[in-house]
Image: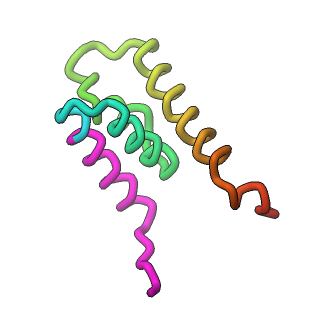
Amino acid sequence: MKLREKPPEAIRRDALKMATKKFSEGCTDCGMGYLGLAREHGASEEELAKAIDLLEKPVSRRHLFKIGAAGAVLALGRNLLDPTAAFATT
């Protein structure tokens, strides 16, 4: 069975939507996972901040740094735990 691949814009949009939903449900870890996915597909810092409702308050550099750090940890962690990544040539 062949899976249909979504364009990066659609993945980014859907991931931001799900992050907002998960944060509103109280699942911070789930929301951060979706933010990491959105970042991998080109989401800006402003889009990430908006997903967690930081734009209603003054956005501090500290908040943006936390979002960026969490996204980097998610991206790096995913690559470190992927057993096929060790055998990738490019």
Which x, y percent locates residue 85? 71, 56
- Identify which residue, 86 or 52, lies in the foreground: 86
Q: Is residue 86 visible?
A: yes
Query: Number of labelled discs?
Result: 0
Q: Quadrant of residue 80?
A: top right
Residue 21, placed above or below residue 2? above
Name, please, the residue furthest toward the bottom: 1
Q: Quadrant where the C terminus lies?
A: bottom right
**Picture residue at 34% right of the left edge, 16% below the top:** 59
**Picture residue at 34% right of the left edge, 39% below the top:** 30
89 lies left or right of 2? right
* Residue 29 covered by magenta stretch: no
Which x, y percent locates residue 18? 27, 47
**Picture residue at 39% right of the left edge, 12% below the top:** 60
Q: Quadrant where the N terminus lies?
A: bottom left
50 lies left or right of 34? left
Q: Quadrant of residue 48?
A: top left
Secondary structure mostly taken by the magenta-highlighted segment of the chain = helix
Per the rendered image, the range of residues in magenta is 1-21
Residue 26, placed above or below residue 76? above
Q: Is residue 50 visible?
A: no
78 lies left or right of 83? left
Residue 61, placed above or below residue 46? above
- Identify which residue, 44 or 88, lies in the foreground: 88
Residue 27, placed above or below residue 59? below
